[in-house]
């Protein structure tokens, strides 16, 4: 992996990009956004540089900041970004957890209300009516910051010539804008009826039909968004003159996007089915239960399914694991540097920086797979030992260091994956598998039983 001093210039990167893959900057940006290349790939840095050039030309500040951050984290001795973090990034930190809480509250309220009506529980029904108005406001107010920020960016967007060019920005974010505008408009309409802000005789007590129609729109919008991404990658896969390895990587990413499209569309269909069934009073509780169950499946199962699917469709799961470890270690170093400096924290940063250097020099070579497995296994063992020691005393509410928890989240999808490998690397694969699945460490950070079982020499010692 090149250092900052070895980072290719714009002319070099563009020439290499055209020679190896014949992709322009816009196409390189599309490849980067879908994670077609990983840190150990030969084309990764060149493709990332070309993508950054495209974001700079088109003034896509959010994606530019994310790409520059990834470049710094995947480059040896990467420097800290001087540009401020975009507002959208800050919004993203709280929008996910807040959205889950918002949706779960709304759907649980609908479930409890349906059960109360079915059992004629007056007290519960009265309590639900007391919460309907504030929840009706929460239902649409969530979309205001996201939509306002997107439209504000579009109004001030300029192209590389300095001319106003909101169309490119709006087109890039068309699915997000249509989603937010539809949900905000419907939420305001139904909330206005609940609050008696206005009277809509055509809707009256049948405002639920408008919400069901919105869920039907959500199915179409979700499927169209995923299919648009698939079509764009299929066009790149059909580009003349690209290397077969690059084409295989794009095809693998298309397979992952198809799985993502199917999962997201099924979730949207589940929500639509539940809302449609809720329109029938005798079985409204069944429809509400379908909606709550689909919500839980979406948040707790779909992400795990997609993260494993990403590995299963990858052309090289070991390289993908390495890429995620590089980003994880760099992120932890940045996070610890921002905290109050202490001697223990300084030592931990040094350990992580040593691991980062090893990750930066790791390469996947088809002719030396044994070495690649063995080296990555050693790095992973060092990382697990370093992550399990924290500078702060562990408490009842924080039994694990944050570094260890986040590392476990990175490794979780890889633990039960069966990578394609030949007999010559079976031994090294089993050792890496044991390192991934090992759960506990002793005070010295040495992994227990799992690693011993995978290495008879260690057991004998």
Image: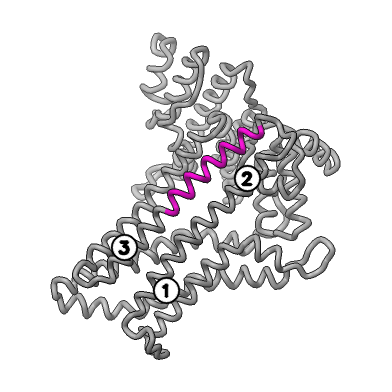
Q: Which sits earlier in the primary sequence, circle 2 or circle 3?
A: 2
Q: Nearer the viewer, residue 109 or 350?
A: 109
Q: Is residue 348 visible?
A: no
Query: Relative to 445, is 165 above or below?
Result: below
In the rendered view, how is the structure colored? one colour
Q: Residue under circle 1?
A: 138
Q: Residue under circle 2?
A: 233
Query: Relative to 244, is 232 above or below?
Result: below
Q: Is residue 378 visible?
A: yes
Marks 1/3 in contact by CB < 8 Å: the verdict is no
Q: Residue under circle 3?
A: 274
Residue at 62 percent across and 44 percent down: it is 234
* Residue 58, image x, y percentages: 75, 59
* Residue 119, image x, y percentages: 13, 71
Mark 2 element type: helix
Point out the frontmost of discs 1 and 2: 2
Mark 1 element type: helix
- The residue segment tinted magenta is 246-265
Q: Nearer the viewer, residue 305 or 330?
A: 305
Mark 2: few/some/many CA within 10 Å (<14, 14-19, 20+): many
* Residue 383, image x, y percentages: 52, 32
Residue at 42 percent across and 24 percent down: it is 434
């Amino acid at each position: 992996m090149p250092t900052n001093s070895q980072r290719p210039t714009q002319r070099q990167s563009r020439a290499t990009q055209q020679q190896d893959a014949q992709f322009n900057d816009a196409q390189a940006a599309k490849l980067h956004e879908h994670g077609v290349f990983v840190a150990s790939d030969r084309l990764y840095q060149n493709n990332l540089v070309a993508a950054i050039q495209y974001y700079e030309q088109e003034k896509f500040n959010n994606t530019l900041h994310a790409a520059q951050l990834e470049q710094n984290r995947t480059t040896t001795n990467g420097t800290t970004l001087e540009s401020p973090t975009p507002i959208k990034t800050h919004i993203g930190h709280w929008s996910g957890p807040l959205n889950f809480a918002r949706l779960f509250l709304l759907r649980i309220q609908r479930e409890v209300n349906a059960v109360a009506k079915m059992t004629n529980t007056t007290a519960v029904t009265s309590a639900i009516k007391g919460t309907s108005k504030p929840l009706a406001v929460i239902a649409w107010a969530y979309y205001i910051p996201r939509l306002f920020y997107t439209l504000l960016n579009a109004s001030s967007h300029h192209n590389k010539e300095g001319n106003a060019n909101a169309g490119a920005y709006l087109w890039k974010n068309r699915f997000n804008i249509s989603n937010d505008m539809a949900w905000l408009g419907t939420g305001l309409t139904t909330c206005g009826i609940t609050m008696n802000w206005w009277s809509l005789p055509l809707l009256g007590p049948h405002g639920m039909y408008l919400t069901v129609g919105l869920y039907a729109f959500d199915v179409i919008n979700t499927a169209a968004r995923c299919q648009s991404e698939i079509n764009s990658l299929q066009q790149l896969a059909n580009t003349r003159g690209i290397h077969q390895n690059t084409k295989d990587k794009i095809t693998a990413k298309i397979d992952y996007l198809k799985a993502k499209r199917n999962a997201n569309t099924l979730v949207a269909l589940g929500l639509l089915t539940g809302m449609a069934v809720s329109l029938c009073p005798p079985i409204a509780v069944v429809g509400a239960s379908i909606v709550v169950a689909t919500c839980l499946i979406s948040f707790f199962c779909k992400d795990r399914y997609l993260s494993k699917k990403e590995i299963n469709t990858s052309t090289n799961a070991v390289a993908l694991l390495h890429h995620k470890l590089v980003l994880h270690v760099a992120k932890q170093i940045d996070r610890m540097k921002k905290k109050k400096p202490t001697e223990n924290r300084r030592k931990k940063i040094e350990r992580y920086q040593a691991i980062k250097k090893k990750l930066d020099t790791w390469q996947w070579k088809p002719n030396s797979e044994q070495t690649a497995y063995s080296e990555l296994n050693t790095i992973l063992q060092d990382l697990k030992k370093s992550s399990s020691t924290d500078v702060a005393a562990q408490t009842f509410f924080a039994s694990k260091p944050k570094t260890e928890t986040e590392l476990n989240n990175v490794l979780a999808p890889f633990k039960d994956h069966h990578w394609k490998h030949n007999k010559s690397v079976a031994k090294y694969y089993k050792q890496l598998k044991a390192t991934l699945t090992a759960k506990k460490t002793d005070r010295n950070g040495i992994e227990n039983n799992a690693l011993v079982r995978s290495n008879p020499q260690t057991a004998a010692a």
